[in-house]
Image (spheres, rainbow, N blue to C red):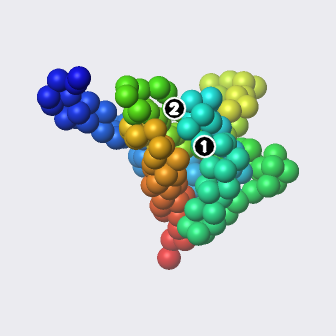
Amino acid sequence: MRPAGWGAAAAAVLLPMAAAAQDTTWNRYTLEGLAGVHVRAETNLGCEGAGVSAESMRTDAVAALEAAEVPLLTEQEMLASPGIPELRVTFECGGGVAGVVGYSVSVRVQQATQMIRDTQITLSEAVTWWASEVGVAEAGSVAPALKSLMERKLGEFAEAFHEANAEEG
């Protein structure tokens, strides 16, 4: 039998939390001039066990970005585009207690970069913009919780992308 108040204590600790200072003026600056992004989704075995596949979430992410009018690139277009811009959506789920699953959703833009102090040094991937959040859900409602959180984070990205690429006028 659970002690009284256990659920309230768990909720207070495990309610969705956003990581701080991820969408800043500097981060938005790194989105300026991008022709678009190629979308890639990843998930771990915990999420797959809860019925969430990387491919289904990628399909949902593409639909959300198309609705937000963010230009999308094929893999070939991404590879030919300066910076090789990829939007990576990552889901992680872990076992919890008594039918509760902890999860995280991360949306990040990765681009190729070059060092200022030595331009011969390049990095094939550097995270230039990101948004992430964690939460908990009952085992049977993990997929809708992840989808909802992903859509919120993609909305933040779409807003940042459009702001960074707005025509001055």
Above or below residue 89? Residue 152 is: below
What residue lies at 67% left-to-right and 42% top-to-bottom? 54
Above or below residue 78? Residue 90 is: above
What residue lies at 23% left-to-right and 33% top-to-bottom? 7
Q: If the image is split into quadrants, where does the N terminus sit? A: top left
The kind of secondary structure element at disc 2 is strand
Depth check: give the residue in front, 133 or 33.
133
User: Looking at the picture, how far across and down is residue 145, in whole percent?
Assistant: 45, 48
The kind of secondary structure element at disc 1 is loop
**Quarter holding residue 91:** top right
Label 1 near label 2: C-beta < 8 Å?
yes
Depth check: give the residue in front, 18 or 146.
146
Q: Circle 2 sits on which residue?
A: 93
Horizontal side of 58 relative to 80 (left or right) equals left
Identity of the amino acid at label 1?
Answer: Val
Horizontal side of 117 relative to 129 (left or right) equals right
User: Looking at the picture, how far across and down is residue 168, in whole percent?
Assistant: 51, 71
User: Looking at the picture, how far across and down is residue 113, in whole percent?
Assistant: 67, 35
Q: Circle 1 sits on which residue?
A: 52
Identity of the amino acid at label 2?
Answer: Cys
What residue lies at 40% left-to-right and 41% top-to-bottom? 137
The crowd level at tag 2 (other Cα within 10 Å; few <14, some 14-19, many 20+) is: many
Whole-number angstrom distance, CA of label 2 to CA of label 1: 10 Å
Horizontal side of 86 relative to 156 (left or right) equals right
User: Looking at the picture, how far across and down is residue 59, in whole percent?
Assistant: 68, 55
The crowd level at tag 1 (other Cα within 10 Å; few <14, some 14-19, many 20+) is: many
